Amino acid sequence: MQCLEKYYRLAEGPASADSLHRAFQRGGVKAAVEWQIKFVKARAASRYVSPVDLAELYAQLGNREETLALLEEAFRQHAPGLLWIQGDPAYDFLHGEPRYRSLIQRIGIPTAY
């Protein structure tokens, strides 16, 4: 839910906050995270958005492939947010994934699994 809070604060004005609230009321956390993904992708059309931010959202949905693809893109971009992915419980479901383990090793951060 940490990411939900982060993007709720980033929402541009009451209309966006209301939209997020309505999404949550209609479909719970999953719908709210899907709303955040759309919001962040729209924001990315006009400014830089770190792939780590999107990866965290997809991780909250349990979307293994999209999460890993975005983390790989973040690695290619040298995104600083990668340094903290081991401490984010959103990625716990990836700890057994060889591609995730390889990424952690290439980043050079200690493993948490």
Image (cartoon, grey):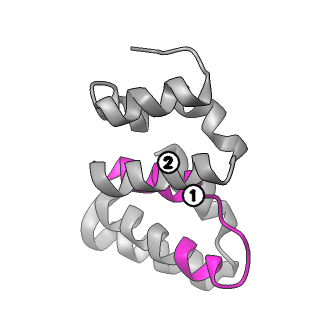
Q: Is residue 29 left or right of residue 7?
A: left
The reply to whether the magenta stretch includes residue 51 is yes
> Residue at (27%, 25%) from the top-left corner?
96
The reply to whether the magenta stretch includes residue 93 is no
Q: Which residue is mark 2?
A: 71
> Residue at (38%, 48%) from the top-left corner?
59
Of the 4 image quadrants, the one containing the C terminus is: top left
Q: Residues within 10 Å of mark 2 (few under 14, many from 20)?
A: many
> Residue at (39%, 34%) from the top-left corner?
100
Q: Measure the C-alpha gap from mark 2 to mark 1.
A: 7 Å
Q: Which residue is mark 1?
A: 51
Q: x%, y% of residue 33?
A: 40, 62
Q: Nearer the viewer, residue 61 or 70?
A: 70
Q: Residues within 10 Å of mark 1 (few under 14, many from 20)?
A: many
Which element type, helix, strand or loop, lies under badge 2? helix
* Residue 86 shows up from this direction: no
Which region is colored magenta?
40-61
Judged by its main secondary structure, the magenta piece is helix
**Residue contact at pointers 2 and 1, CB within 8 angstroms:** yes
> Residue at (68%, 66%) from the top-left corner?
10
Q: Amino acid at mark 2?
A: Leu
Q: x%, y% of residue 111?
A: 49, 15
